[in-house]
Image (cartoon, rainbow, N blue to C red):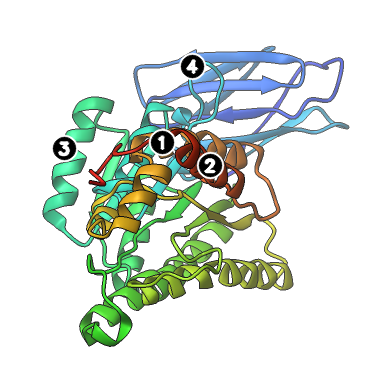
Amino acid sequence: MTMAMTLPALGAPPHVTGVLGKNSAAVVLSREGVLGCKLRPTVAWRQDWGGGELSSGVNEALFRRSRSTGVVSCSMVSAKENAPDSVLRDGASRFNVLITGSTKGVGLALAEEFLRNGDNVVVCSRSQERVQSVVQELRSQFGEQRVWGKECDVRDAKSIEALADYVKSNLGHIDCWINNAGTNAYKYNSLVDSDDADIMEIVETNTLGVMLCCRQAIKMMRDQRRGGHIFNMDGAGADGNPTPRFAAYGATKRSLAQFTKSLQAELKQANIQNVVVHNISPGMVTTDLLMSGSDTRQAKFFINVLAETPDTVAKYLVPRVRKIVEENKNSSTYPRFLTGFKAYTQILARLLFKARKDRYVSED
């Protein structure tokens, strides 16, 4: 569907953008400022401008003024692809964010922090009951149209595809997909004492799950006009240091950096420039996964010295992730909460001044 109208001459040839979404908000902007804005209580709007008139319905429109003829062309697109709530009242962008494994721990803290920043969030986990409970709780805090949720098993390609279809139907697009789901089977054993089922769960969730989610996210984002950003969450072992008693977990996290680099190389070969894959590091976080291994003197020491709460980590990481998406960086990044310098500083403070002793668990 196309429309055209003649506009009065303007001083400089502007790029004009009009947006219409579910709230029937019409905004027309140019390099020279706001040229028109009307809010209507119905799904249709009419924008009068210099004697011309433009009408539209429930879809959105992209407008461009010709430098030579002064004619605006209009291409209609899906209403959810560029909805009016993509811009907040203070002018900052609002993003659609999907986080796997987000009904507890770091994932839930990230979801809450994105919501505090004005974004829309899709939460998911294997448990439909947990998803429904979290969605209900978050909607009570942040609103019905800000929070979405669906059961998803990241080990199952069909389940991930269904999640992507759910997102398209309800939000239209995803700006930021965070692969947070991960597990160590909540057990700390040597590899030789680990059950087959536990090893398979760790590898399938942490490695296969990330691969399948990245594949689906790339398929979805490459077809979006705005593209998107994928973040793979690392964990203990990502730096190559040994992870005794959870060797399988550490090995899966060590592989993520190489996997991300390989995906970036493939995207470059395919000339897909609107999708970027990143790593992200939360450091040590006081989740059930970490605390289930706090049964040795060494573990208690490092948990107290280096670990932080999920909320603290989320408050640090979310602004950095949002900045990457906001600036639409086209190169891979690696935001880290716990840097090497920070870790050594905190360890030194503990050894010299007994700082953070017994902060989370008693060491006596």
Residue 287 as seen in the image, left or right of residue 44: left
At horizontal 21% and vertical 62% (from top left) the residue drawn is 126
Mark identifier at residue 89:
4
At horizontal 21% and vertical 84% (from top left) the residue drawn is 195
**Residue 101 in sight:** no
Residue 214, percent from left and from top: 48, 66
Q: Which amino acid does label 2 sit on?
A: Leu
**In the image shown, does 15 or 52 lie closer to the viewer?**
15
Number of residue marks? 4
Mark 3 neighbour class, 10 Å CA radius: few under 14, some 14 to 19, many 20 or more: some
Q: Quadrant of the N terminus?
A: top right
Disc 1 target residue: 354
The quarter of the displayed image where residue 249 is located: bottom left
Disc 2 target residue: 348
Residue 336, percent from left and from top: 55, 47
At horizontal 23% and vertical 26% (from top left) the residue drawn is 141
Mark identifier at residue 136:
3
The disc, 2 or 4, on the residue closer to the chain's N-terminal end is 4
Residue 321, percent from left and from top: 54, 41
